[in-house]
Amino acid sequence: MQADPFRARGTAYGAIHKDNPNDARKNKPLTAKFVLLVLLCLIVPPLVFVGCFCANAYTLHYRADAAQSQMDGMVFFATTTVPALVFMIVFVGLMIAAGNHRPVKWPFLLLSLFAVAWGAGTYTGLYNYNAYSRDYYLNHDMATYPAVNPDRASAGAYFDAGFTSFTFGSRVATERAIALQNHHTYCIAPIVSTPREAPIVTPATGAFEWFAAGIDCCTPQGTNFTCGEVGNFHARSGVRWVKQEVFPFLKLASQEWGAHFNMPVGVRVIFLTWVQDPWYAVEALSWQVEVNRTTYTYMFAMLNTAVVLAAAWYFWKMEPPAYQWTPKMDLEAHDKRTTSSI
């Protein structure tokens, strides 16, 4: 009896799937659509992360705060986030409308990575803005005053000072430092122009109004005051403390200082970080934001790449080949035609 070549060929094809169902997947080629989806998931989320970070950590956020308006943030949201979300929704809708529910997993993956990138970029951007960028922009927008005599200059006349340089011989009286504790240790010490050997007396203005300040840079008793660059003999400048959440505690510390040493403290007090070069100290804040942005972006890109490659491998391994069982179906149809003819 002559063997049916069609049956032999069909049996061979059917055996591939019956005995080794993974053989077809191993030989399945990567399509251009598959590669494009992988590249899309690798590129879009890091770009969204960087965009959200920059929108919240740089000038756009500062301008919105300065104007007491969220217009800049709304503009950024309307020009970047909304189109991306609309694109994702339309993409998913088209996949479902086409009747091919299987590819929906790729838009879902991209949408999930987009949401994570949006949240992570926004959170890290806000953190860096509150920690570094806001102080950088505020100090740059304020005035600069050179050669200020702390014993004769009233702080009220310099209340817009961001950078202040004092006269030669000015120093931080660390022997008169004090600390206020409230979760953190808020340390302050008066800025005076009297020599260390001379006794500290009330300034000509009638009250102490210039203080060097810092957080967690002294003991709870105020000793071992190391805030800023008080150990630098060449330092006689200050950068204004502009953190709104810190100022009330520094103000309380100045009142405690006046009560402790029985000396008058002005109503308007300026707190400074004691440094040698105030411009360098403020620029360091901007550099720190850049370092953090680069570090966070690399970390997110690496994690995103790992997730995408793992998901792509899983999708590729679990996706059945398009030609699976086709020869067997042809064989069954052939058998039916042969039986009907008999």
Image (tube, rainbow, N blue to C red):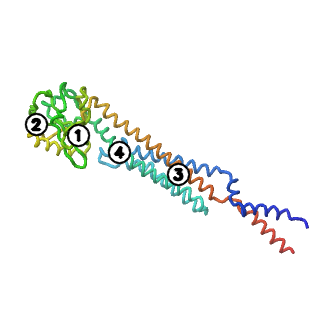
Report which residue position mark 4 lands on: 61
Q: Is residue 143 visible?
A: no
Q: Nearer the viewer, mark 3 or mark 1?
A: 1
Give me the residue at 14% from left, 44% from top. 256
Q: Earlier in the sequence, mark 2 or mark 3?
A: 2
- Bin the neighbour count of mark 3 within 10 Å (Cα to Cα): few under 14, some 14-19, many 20 and up: some
Q: Nearer the viewer, mark 2 or mark 4?
A: 2
Q: Earlier in the sequence, mark 3 or mark 4?
A: 4
Q: Report, in whole angstroms, how far the alpha carbon at label 3 lies from the one at label 1.
A: 45 Å
Q: Earlier in the sequence, mark 4 or mark 1?
A: 4
- Bin the neighbour count of mark 1 within 10 Å (Cα to Cα): few under 14, some 14-19, many 20 and up: many
Is label 2 in contact with label 3 (beta carbons under 8 Å)? no
Q: Report, in whole angstroms, how far the alpha carbon at label 1 lies from the one at label 2.
A: 24 Å
Three-letter amino acid code of the residue under disc 3: Val
Three-letter amino acid code of the residue under disc 4: His
Give me the residue at 30% from left, 31% from top. 279
Is label 4 in contact with label 1 (beta carbons under 8 Å)? no
Three-letter amino acid code of the residue under disc 1: Cys
Is label 3 in contact with label 4 (beta carbons under 8 Å)? no
Q: Classify residue 218 by image quadrant.
A: top left
Report which residue position mark 2 lands on: 207
Q: Residue 235: x and y, percent?
A: 24, 28
Q: Is residue 335 above or below residue 78?
A: below
Report which residue position mark 3 lands on: 307
Q: Earlier in the sequence, mark 1 or mark 2?
A: 2
Q: Name the disc covering residue 218, or none.
A: 1
Q: Nearer the viewer, mark 2 or mark 3?
A: 3
Q: Nearer the viewer, mark 4 or mark 1?
A: 1
